[in-house]
Image: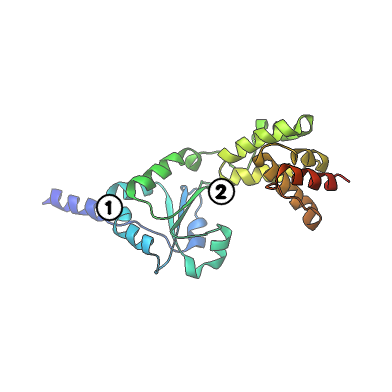
Amino acid sequence: MKLLLLSLILCTNLSALDWQKDYAKAMAVENKKPTLLYFTADWCGPCKEMQKTTFKDDSVIKELAQYNIIMIDYDKNEELVKKYRVSGIPQFTLLNRFDEIVNQKSGYMSSALLKSWLKENSYLSFSDAELSKLNSTEKDLIKNFSQDSLKSMETIYSLYQKSPPAKQQALMNEMLNLQQEDLLKVLAHQLLGPRLIAANLLQLKLGEKFTYDPWANPEARKLQLESLNK
């Protein structure tokens, strides 16, 4: 009889996810676990399907027990939708212990896909290091940028692509201190990625005065760059 009762208790504990719905209260908890934000709505078909399948899976319930899980109504939380740049639902936003964005993913996810996605990002999710703080290598790369701006931006772009959003923002913030003339040199880079970063930084620095299309053909980019260098 005792074994039967214990089995029933265990089954009950695994029967449903304990979603928190008060974002402010949940985020205010000290020494909390990594956080998974789940943006949903009553009219969301894929969300309803996940409630019937993915979120009923005992292995998913067990996996999510390691996280602070918060359900956010898309229609009732406009500020949070803007803050986390929700473009479609369901959207999952994974935060580390410092509330920095590790990764985001939209759309229906099966049990296997959700667990795989969490596992792929688990190192950063559970890390004690803050993503928004650059390490010494990253700082030196930006500090010595002017020595070879083209090669430096190529390396930074490669790093940027592999980084979570919080690290990407930290890199951009640090690069805002780069000299304008060094960034203008990068606009002549043969690769689109470095040109895009340089163009975004110059747009932030110069505002409406900056007009350059990094997607244009080589001849058009050359003429635009000549105009900028006058």
**Which residue is depicted at the point 38% across and 52% down?**
109
- In this figure, which residue is indicated by the disc labeled 1? 14
Nearer the observer, 148 or 190? 190
Q: Earlier in the sequence, mark 2 or mark 1?
A: 1
Quarter of the rendering containing residue 170: top right
**Which residue is depicted at the point 52% across and 59% down?**
86
Asked if residue 65 can be seen in this view, the reply is: no
Q: Image check: 188 left or right of 76?
A: right
How far is mark 2 from mark 1, CA to CA? 29 Å
Query: How dense is the environment of label 2, judged by Cα within 10 Å: few (below 14), some, or many (20 and up)?
Result: many
- In this figure, which residue is indicated by the disc labeled 2? 100
Question: In the image, is residue 99 above or below residue 147?
Answer: below
Nearer the observer, 58 or 175? 175
Disc 2, SS = loop
Disc 1, SS = loop
- Contact check, label 2 and label 1, Cβ < 8 Å: no
Question: In the image, is residue 42 above or below residue 104?
Answer: below
Q: Image check: 165 left or right of 106?
A: right
Residue at the limit of the structure toward the right, as seen here: 230
Q: Image check: 37 left or right of 147?
A: left
Query: How dense is the environment of label 1, judged by Cα within 10 Å: few (below 14), some, or many (20 and up)?
Result: some
Q: Image check: 26 left or right of 79?
A: left
Nearer the observer, 221 or 168? 221
**Which residue is depicted at the point 30% across and 57% down?**
16
Q: Which mark is residue 67?
A: none
**Which residue is depicted at the point 41% across and 40% down?**
119
Question: Residue 123 placed where, x, y %?
Answer: 47, 37
Question: Residue 159 placed where, x, y %?
Answer: 61, 36
Amino acid bearing label 2: Glu
Asked if residue 69 can be seen in this view, the reply is: yes
